[in-house]
Structure formats: structure tokens, C-alpha cells
Image (cartoon, rainbow, N blue to C red):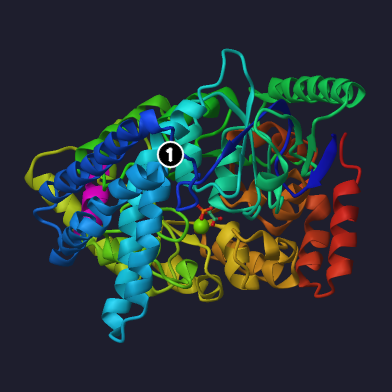
Amino acid sequence: MSFTLHGLPISGGIAIGQARLISQATLEVSHRVIAPRRVEKEVARFESAMLRVRTEFEAMKSGMENSPADMRAFIDLHRMILDDPELSEAPKQIIRERRCNAEWAIVQQMEVLVQQFERMDDAYLRERSYDVRQAVERVVRELAGRQHANRLKGAKGERLIVVAHDLSPADIMAFRNHGVVSFVTDVGGATSHTAILARGMGVPAVLGLHNARQLIRDQETLIVDGARGVVIVNPGQRILEEYELRKTQLELESSKLKMLKTARATTLDRIKIDLLANIEGPEDVEAVLECGADGVGLFRTEFIFLGRGDMPSEDEQFEAYRKTVKGMEGHPIVIRTFDLGNDKDLHVADEAPGDRRRENPALGLRSVRLSLSEPKVFLAQLRAILRASKFGKVKILIPMVSHAFQVDQTLALLEQAKSSLRGEKIAFDEDIQIGGMIEVPAAALAIGTFLRRLDFLSIGTNDLIQYTLAIDRADEQVAYLYDPLHPAVLMLLSHIIGSSEKAGVPVSMCGEMAGDPNFTRLLLGLGLRQFSMFPARIPAVKQRVKQCDIAGIEALARRIARLDEPAKIVEQVERLNAWPQQS
Ligand code: PEP
Ligand code: MG
């Protein structure tokens, strides 16, 4: 039977392929009855997953001699939990007696233990139920992880469309090399990091479909229309042909736009605009050069190491940064320090104090707050970036600044990193520039604090909108409130850009808004001259820049930013975009 699902349009383009249902790496596990002759094999699978997790704990501990004691204590606690016969022995009995699969068996035992902890009077002991869940989650991930990879192999030439309840950024990174042509999920917001990664990979994606996992079956044919947020399940022949045609047309349009690659991004009144790329790792460099970007405006370093299970060493980081910087062939590159926490973790959530699950992770120990709470880790990253600065034009970007002291402390750590490198006679760029991301309304309002301390600013609209409008950017239930044209957002943007211009401090924008051609004229009119976006968006934005006469729209853009009536703003932005400026 053919039917259509509607969700949030995340990443444009059309994908046609076969559904592959993925259960997330959480405790949502499959329930299977094991054939009697396979029972001992299932026990062995369970034992070997437990062994791998224990070995992983050992390796983590031995690499953490210099880490804080409570970090090591967390690992010990989780190891002890897994060594408890309730979790190490009882699941084997369940597999043998009830013939449950290993995941199901350990989750049943976990439920028993969690209930015991939750009934305890002592608040500390009650909290330990989280540790039990996290320790078991690690084993489940280990059991499921290998199946995940295998399931995603697919037959040769098969076009896989991942259907999941939810996908974390780490999951997306793991799928990167499996020939997945599209993602659809039940939950997730348009500027969640999962959405950003899907766009970066250039694959159509629709999130927030609510019941996709329940309604779609494995292997069913799907059409994903990423621009419209539509998923068609089991389409008929006529619809399939129509979409094949639309897909070809879109590919043709995008290859026409690519012809702008070598054209300069200069407006009709001859103002040069910098169009930069957002990247997640060295493997994106090829796409950046391919689309004719002027450089990298945002390197989200945390993505290289997402899902790997521990903190990368200074040398590992240096290698990744050096490779990226060298690959950029002399173009400037802005390296952002780790923006971990919230929805992005290294799966060290169970051990690192900063990553403990909280009610409001977006407001918690995230980003530069987390980095400053782990000065050794932060110092290692600053040293790695400095070492890479010898190979090209590198700038450092600190995410989510809100307080002056965060900048002061980071600058002090940077000085410390520089002086240690000088002591070791390791070369780096002595004049490296350091900038801050303006993505918290407090920082936008008190912009002078940051203009005085930093060499440049970059506006993170994804978080700025999230925090200004008090909506979780990853929650599809409030996605309808996510509005870049909200009067409060426009007032903040105009204030940041205008103040930076007055102070003579360069300002760029690296949130998703910078890559949306519908906002290009408005932002140019407000004075923005540097835009950073995922590489595939550069040609479309460049086309808009080339058709724009800034002098002719400045007054209207500034008037729009002063309006406080939403309908009027939308009407005036449409008027701005319709303005015939093309010569
Ligand atoms: C932003 O918040 O706009 C931004 C660019 O950072 P991230 O999306 O990585 O949070
Ligand atoms: Mg951000």
C-alpha cells in the first residue's frame, strides 16, 4: 500500500531507495527467541560483548593517569556494576532458560536492578540507577554496533535510506561511509546537529516524522523529498517516474550552479563577499575546494572524534588539524574548539563528570564551559591547533561565550600553550587570531565585552535562535517556533553586525541562516560581509550575492530589522528578495 508521511524538510534533494530500519544505540532492543541449537552461541556473544566493554574500560583507565580522580572513579563504578553477578551471570541464565537474545536478556536484568535502586531512600543510591542504565547501554551498544554496521552494508548498488526513531550526530558519523542516500527519523529539529550533518553530507533528509519507524517496513521502497519534508512509501510506477525526472532536473540545476565555482562573489556594486565553508573533518576539504569557497569559516572539531569512546590525544588532534590545514592550500581556516555536551558527546558520557545527563543539557556544562572545566584537555587542544597553525592560515574560535572571564581564561590558557611550545622549540603562528562565537543572547546584547577582547566574531544563529526563543533546536515538537525572522532575532543580528562594524572587528555568520539564499539580501543589507555554510550551499548563495546591489537595499534591510510585527517582516523580506537588481 502506498502512503505519504510529512515531517520537517532538513536537507534538499530527492532520494529514492530501500528502507533500512535502524534501532538506535539505546535500550530500545529487539526481542528475539533463540533457536535451541543457537543458545550457547548467543551466550558466547553476550560474554564476548562484556569482555570487549571491560577491555575498553581498562584501556580508558590506563590512558587517564593524569585525569581527575572522579573521572577514574566513574569507570571503576561502571566496571563494578557490570561485574555484579546480576548483570554478568543472570543474563546468561535468561538466555539459556527463556531463550531470549542477549540484548533482551541484559535489559531485563537491568530493569530489575534499576527498580531496586529507585526504591531506595538514600538519594545518592537512587541516582545510581542512571549508572546501571549507562553501563548496560554500553554493552547493548557493543552488541548492536556490529549488527548496525553489517545491516548497513546492503547489496552492491543498493540505495539505502535509514529509517530511525532518532539518530545522534555520532550515529550519522558512523553511517558516513556506508552508501546511505538519505535519513528519515521520527524526532529531531531542523537545526539539530543531526540535521546539520545530513546537510553537510549532501543527502536529502526529513526529520520529525513521528511514526516512521512504526509505519515503514524494512526493504520498502521510499521516495524522500528533502526540500518539502515528504516521504512517500511504496510509490506507484507513475509517481516513481515523476520523481526520477525531478531528481534529474535538480541534479542538472545544481551542476549549472557549480559552474559559478571560479566566479568571484562580488555584488553589483563591487563589494567582495567572503563565502566560507563549514566542515566536520579533513575529509570535507575536497568538497570545500570543489565548491570554490574562500576558506573554512567553521571547523566543528568535535565531530572528528564523536562516538569514538574517549578523548583524543594532542597528537591525534594535531594530525587531523594539520591534514585539514594543509589540504586547504593556503586558504584561511577557522578551527573551533570542542563544542561538546548537549547532543554531542564522545560516548564518554558515562565517565566524564561534565557529560553526566542533566535535565537541560543545552543550558548545562556544554561547549567552552566544559572545556574550561577540563583545563588539561583544553590545553591539549589549544596546543594541537597552535602546532597546526605552522602549516597555513589558522584562526581559533571559542564557542558559546557568555561571560568575559571565559574569554580571559581561554586567552590565559592560550598563552600557557604558546609558552610551553616555545619552551619545546615547536613552531607555531605567534600572531594567531582568536575569535568568539556569539550564540547566546547575553553575549549579543553585551557585545562590547567581546569586541574589546577578541580579534573577530562569528554569529552562531542556530544556538542564538534556540536561546533567544527558548526552544530546543533538536525537538521537532517546537520546531514551528524556530524563526530566524522573529523580530527579537533580527534586532540582535542587527545589533551584533552594526556594533562590530563600528568597532572595526570582522564578523561572520556560521549558523544555518548564512547558507539560506532567502536571507542573503537581508544579511548583506544589514552589513554582513562573511558567510560560512555547508559547502553545497555556496553556489546558490554566490548567485544571490552576484545579483545584489547592496546600496540599493541597505535602507530597506535596516528598516526590516526595526519592525516588530512578524507578518510585516515576512512581507518586507519577500519584497526585498523580489527586488529586481539583476543587471
Ligand atoms: C550555531 O550555533 O549556529 C553554530 C554554528 O554552532 P553549532 O551548530 O555547531 O552549535
Ligand atoms: Mg552553536
For the residue pair 49 and 469, the one nearer the viewer reads as 49
Q: Is residue 407 visible in the rendered structure shown here?
A: no
Residue 433 lies in the magenta-colored region: no
For the residue pair 413 and 274, the one nearer the viewer reads as 413
Q: Is residue 466 left or right of residue 254?
A: left
Q: Callout 1: 10 Å neighbours few (<14), some, many (20+)? A: many
Where residue 465 appears, x then y in whole percent? 63, 65
Q: Residue at x 66, y 36 (%)?
A: 537
Residue reaching furthest to the top: 156
Q: Quadrant of residue 560?
A: bottom right
Q: Is residue 325 visible in the rendered structure shown here?
A: yes
Residues in magenta? 376-384
Where residue 165 appears, x then y in whole percent? 60, 49
Quarter of the image where the C terminus is located:
top right
Q: Residue at x 23, y 39 (%)?
A: 52
Q: Is residue 225 left or right of residue 508?
A: right
Q: Quadrant of residue 22?
A: top right
Where residue 533 appears, x then y in whole percent? 59, 42
Quarter of the image where the N terminus is located:
top right
Residue 379 lies in the magenta-colored region: yes
Above or below, 204 against 575 in this view is above
Above or below, 68 against 161 in this view is below
The residue type indicated by label 1 comes to Ile
Main secondary structure of the magenta stretch: helix
Q: Which residue is mark 1?
A: 333
For the residue pair 113 and 433, the one nearer the viewer reads as 113
Secondary structure under tag 1 reads strand
Q: Is residue 395 left or right of residue 66?
A: right
Q: Residue at x 50, y 51 (%)?
A: 28
Residue reaching furthest to the bottom: 121
